[in-house]
């Protein structure tokens, strides 16, 4: 063997390296801050996945849209550039899975108990299975919470929304919701919302308190209405080819890690949102408005037509099935 061949073999061996060849890396990309229900859930998954696989799997968590924004992260998952995500349920429309927008319907969940009946029941399972033809496997639902509306104007009656530019996620249901209130919906990536609010590109937005707080939106929004008019949660998803190709013993270990991270994320979500409200109130920057019974009724009446308007998009039967499960009318 001449010395060039020996050198080439040595370099080859160095590049492959026995330990590295076995390591499985999961890139988990998300758009929110680490100190949110989703951020903490992702970090817990990392900890448990690495523990249960004895370090065979390494999970790299990329928060705050560091790697990709909303739309790009779904494309990156399909291409295999990242392996795991937990997008909001309101972001699956552009992927062609419009049915998830059922979660965005105003007042479809009275509380978390009603929500769980859907996410932990046959409807939740059926919805996740719709992702398979897109090369995506849906593994779990993670909670965030009920949304509040914010603006630099007090939003008490539906009339107060007239002409306001309101940032929304990419869901057509949310578009219809803002239009039903007389506002002008603007789809925008989550990472751009703070600046858009600060510079007046949009006037207001909706989000669970944990997002409003950790993105510092409360610094640039004078009012927030505790409307709980809709819900925001997540589907934890993986690249199907990656998931199906995992070695036999690794998959159950990761499933165990995810099941525990899911319980953890869902257990902390309500408190994280309550703490966020308390912190924002303490800052004194945003005034929090509680609707009277009459005002709440007026919001509900204004938003009710969204259900029938969206029936042809989401599916009449699916809406009826979810409403039956939650007891919403
Ligand atoms: C948003 O874009 O408002 C949310 O989906 C962000 C998130 O992931 O909670």
Image (cartoon, grey):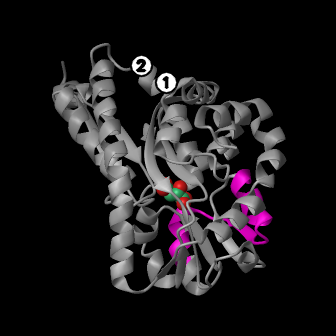
Position above or below: 65 against 222: above
Position above or below: 124 against 34: above
The answer to if 183 sits in the magenta stretch is: yes
Residue span colored magenta: 172-195
Residue that mark 2 sits on: 245
Percent x, y of residue 300: 70, 59
Instruction: Give the side of residue 19 with respect to residue 46, left or right.
Output: left
Instruction: Give the side of residue 315 with respect to residue 212, left or right.
Output: right
Q: How many C-alpha atoms fall within 10 Å of the one at disc 2: few (<14), some, or many (≥20)?
A: few
Which residue is most to the front? 293
Helix, strand or loop: magenta stretch:
helix
Q: Which residue is depicted at the point 74% across and 52% down? A: 172
Q: Which residue is depicted at the point 43% across and 37% down? A: 83
Q: Kindly identify which numbered label has been placed on residue 241.
A: 1
Q: In the structure shown, which secondary structural element does the residue marked by tag 2 occupy?
A: loop
Q: Which image quadrant is residue 42 in?
A: top left
């Amino acid at each position: 063997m001449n010395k060039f061949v020996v050198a080439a073999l040595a370099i080859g061996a160095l590049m492959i390296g026995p330990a590295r060849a076995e390591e499985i890396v999961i890139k988990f990309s998300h758009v929110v801050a680490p100190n949110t229900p989703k951020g903490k859930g992702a970090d817990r998954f990392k900890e448990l996945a690495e523990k249960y696989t004895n370090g065979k799997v390494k999970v790299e968590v990329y928060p705050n849209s560091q790697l990709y924004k909303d739309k790009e992260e779904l494309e990156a998952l399909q291409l295999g550039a990242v392996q795991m995500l937990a997008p909001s349920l309101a972001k699956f429309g552009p992927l062609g899975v419009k049915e998830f927008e059922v979660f965005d319907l105003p007042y479809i969940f009275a509380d978390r108990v009603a929500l769980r009946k859907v996410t932990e029941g046959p409807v939740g399972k059926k919805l996740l299975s719709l992702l398979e033809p897109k090369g995506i496997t849906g593994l779990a639902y993670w909670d965030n919470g009920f949304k509040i509306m914010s603006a630099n104007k007090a939003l008490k009656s539906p009339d107060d929304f007239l002409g306001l530019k309101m940032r929304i996620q990419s869901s057509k249901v949310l578009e219809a919701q803002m239009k039903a209130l007389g506002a002008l919906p603007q789809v925008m990536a989550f990472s751009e919302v703070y600046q858009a609010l600060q510079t007046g590109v949009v006037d207001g937005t909706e989000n669970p308190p944990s997002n409003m707080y950790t993105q510092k939106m409360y610094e640039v929004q004078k009012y927030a209405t505790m409307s709980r008019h809709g819900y925001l949660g997540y589907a934890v998803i993986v690249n199907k080819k990656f998931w199906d190709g995992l070695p036999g013993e690794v998959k159950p270990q990761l499933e165990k890690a995810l099941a525990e991270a899911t319980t953890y994320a869902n257990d902390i979500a309500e408190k994280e949102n309550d703490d966020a409200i308390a912190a924002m109130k303490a800052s004194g920057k945003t005034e929090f408005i509680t609707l009277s019974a009459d005002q709440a009724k007026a919001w509900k009446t204004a938003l009710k037509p969204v259900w029938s308007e969206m029936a042809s998009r989401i599916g009449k039967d699916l809406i009826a099935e979810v409403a039956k499960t939650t007891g919403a009318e």
